[in-house]
Image: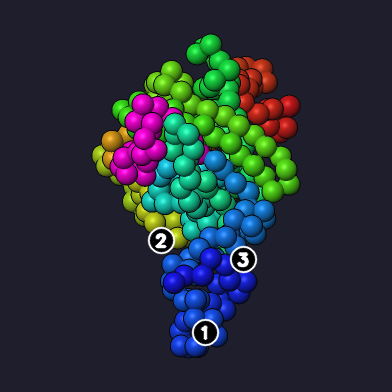
């Protein structure tokens, strides 16, 4: 028979089972199931006291029997995880051509979950493990920042009359990658007729809560669908390897990746002079995320170019004379000092 209680730790029980130690009490039989129960009990009394917890509770007609389809549950949880990691990448202003989020950001924003039943619903308890020393982002509280930002979006979503600028601005600040994953989350909720409640409990005692119902999910899905494209200004440094009046220009970056650029006819003279030189190019990067596949497409348009060792060529237009998109904000100029619209304070050099 299996003992009702054994004071030994799971490690001691496992060692006894593996070593074939004879038990003094014939009523005690060590089995893997026994060890599992002891491990679960230890988890419930130790880990849950030292880890931050997220209670993710799905509600709706399809959860009344304490059941939820595997596809629906995993799609929703995966979309939440990917949204969280994407927000973390946006906080660190991570830019990558390949569309891959670095391992250190994925580790810093990782969630792990265990299922738990609650009346009339299906609840998952998710935990964020202690940050791995092998993966350092330089931002120790990246997970907390990322999840707080995501919860704030969900809270604003419920408080709005569906015409709230704050929701739109938050979503745009997260970028197209996050919009794609939030679109996936809302699509699952709408298709499965589900709602989801979030309760975030910090080990420090701080608590935050948010929820997405069917109405909020429909609105957020629409917003996400309209925010799959972003435009930002970037500075690229590398070797100008291709100059053409017909095809795209090419810059080979220091990481050996090649960027193809569109360039106007006005910049051809500057490009010819910079050919095969190390250059600094100011470009407009347009990022588009395909909602169906998640594929990211980036296109680049040259604004100005100069040799790293020299001054900006007179044929290239100064950045401050252009009207462009910086991140998600528009910056324009006039004959006087430039004006910043919905963005950060103007560059001090312009004042």
Q: Nearer the viewer, residue 100 or 310?
A: 100
Q: Secondary structure at mark 2?
A: loop
**Which residue is under mark 1?**
23
User: Which residue lies under the disc numbered 2?
Assistant: 256
Residue 194 on image: x %, y %:
39, 28
On residue 133, the disc is 3
Q: Quadrant of the C terminus?
A: top right
All told, the count of numbered labels is 3
Q: Position of residue 113 (x, y in %)?
A: 48, 50
Q: Where residue 23 appears, x then y in whole percent?
A: 52, 84
Task: Please report whichever mark, 1 or 3, sits nearer to the chain's N-terminal start.
Answer: 1
| Residue at the (48%, 51%) spot, across then down | 114
Nearer the camera: disc 2 or disc 3: 3
Q: Nearer the viewer, mark 1 or mark 3?
A: 1
Q: CA distance from mark 1 to mark 3?
A: 41 Å
Can residue 295 be seen here?
Answer: no
């Amino acid at each position: 028979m299996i003992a009702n209680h054994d004071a030994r730790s799971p490690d001691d029980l496992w060692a006894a089972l593996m070593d074939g130690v004879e038990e003094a009490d014939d009523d005690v039989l060590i089995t893997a199931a026994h060890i599992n129960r002891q491990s679960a009990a230890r988890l419930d009394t130790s880990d849950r006291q030292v880890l931050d917890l997220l209670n993710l509770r799905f509600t709706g007609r399809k959860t009344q029997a304490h059941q939820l389809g595997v596809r629906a549950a995993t799609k929703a949880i995966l979309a939440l995880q990917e949204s969280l990691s994407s927000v973390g990448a946006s906080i660190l202003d991570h830019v990558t051509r390949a569309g891959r989020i670095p391992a250190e950001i994925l580790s810093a924003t990782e969630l792990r979950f265990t299922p738990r039943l609650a009346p009339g619903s299906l609840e998952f308890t998710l935990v964020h493990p202690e940050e791995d020393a092998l993966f350092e982002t330089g931002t120790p509280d990246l997970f907390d920042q990322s999840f707080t930002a995501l919860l704030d979006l969900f809270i604003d979503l419920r408080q709005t009359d569906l015409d709230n600028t704050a929701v739109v601005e938050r979503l745009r600040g997260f970028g197209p990658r996050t919009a794609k994953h939030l679109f996936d989350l809302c699509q699952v909720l709408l298709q499965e007729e589900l709602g989801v409640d979030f309760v975030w409990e910090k080990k420090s005692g701080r608590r935050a809560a948010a929820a997405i119902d069917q109405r909020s999910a429909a609105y957020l899905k629409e917003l996400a669908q309209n925010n799959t494209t972003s435009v930002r200004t970037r500075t690229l440094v590398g070797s100008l390897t291709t100059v053409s009046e017909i095809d795209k220009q090419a810059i080979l970056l220091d990481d050996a990746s090649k960027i193809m650029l569109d360039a106007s006819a006005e910049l051809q003279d500057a490009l010819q002079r910079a050919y095969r030189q190390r250059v600094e190019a100011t470009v407009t990067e347009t990022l588009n995320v395909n909602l169906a596949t998640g594929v990211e497409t980036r296109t680049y348009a040259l604004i100005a170019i100069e040799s790293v060792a020299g001054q900006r060529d007179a044929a290239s237009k100064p950045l401050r004379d252009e009207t462009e998109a910086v991140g998600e904000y528009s910056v324009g100029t006039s004959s006087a000092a430039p004006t910043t619209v919905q963005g950060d304070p103007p560059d001090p050099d312009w004042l």
